[in-house]
Image (spheres, rainbow, N blue to C red):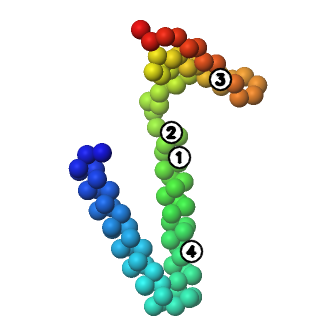
Amino acid sequence: MSQLSRRTMWVGSAVSVLALGGLAVYLMIAGLDDADKLGSVLSAAVGAVALVVTVLSMRTPGARDTSDVRVGGVNVTQINHASGNQQHVNVQPPK
């Protein structure tokens, strides 16, 4: 892991912890009824974002066909259109 990605991970983690801590303090001060309302709105927003990300990831063009892949000198073929979940692996020595 590079120095930049490590730093980015730590900064992102710190921001997340501070945001969650601030939200927890706000919800304790606001009271149970307001906390419940805000929690419902935030949950709905997270659910909507997750749905959009899921749909976009399924519709993204250019997804690689991985039905025949070479992994470390081994040809791996996955059979998707058969009854049951079957996989066929041809092991060949690396060239």
Q: Residue furthest front?
A: 93
Q: What residue type is labelled 4?
A: Ser
Q: Name the residue under label 4.
A: 40
Label 4 and label 2: CA atoms lie apart by 29 Å
Q: In this view, does 52 lie above or below 90?
A: below
Q: Name the residue under label 1.
A: 55
Q: What residue type is labelled 2?
A: Arg
From the image, which quarter does the C terminus lie in?
Answer: top left
Label 1 and label 3: CA atoms lie apart by 28 Å
Q: Mark 2 points at which residue?
A: 59
Q: Residue furthest right?
A: 83
What secondary structure is found at the residue carrying circle 2? helix
Q: Nearer the viewer, mark 4 or mark 2?
A: 4
Q: Position of residue 47 (x, y in %)?
A: 55, 61
Check contact, mark 2 vs mark 1: CB within 8 A. Answer: yes
Q: Name the residue under label 3.
A: 87
- Of label 4 and label 1, which has the lower sequence position? 4
Check contact, mark 4 vs mark 2: CB within 8 A. Answer: no
Q: Which of marks 1 and 3 is in front?
A: 3
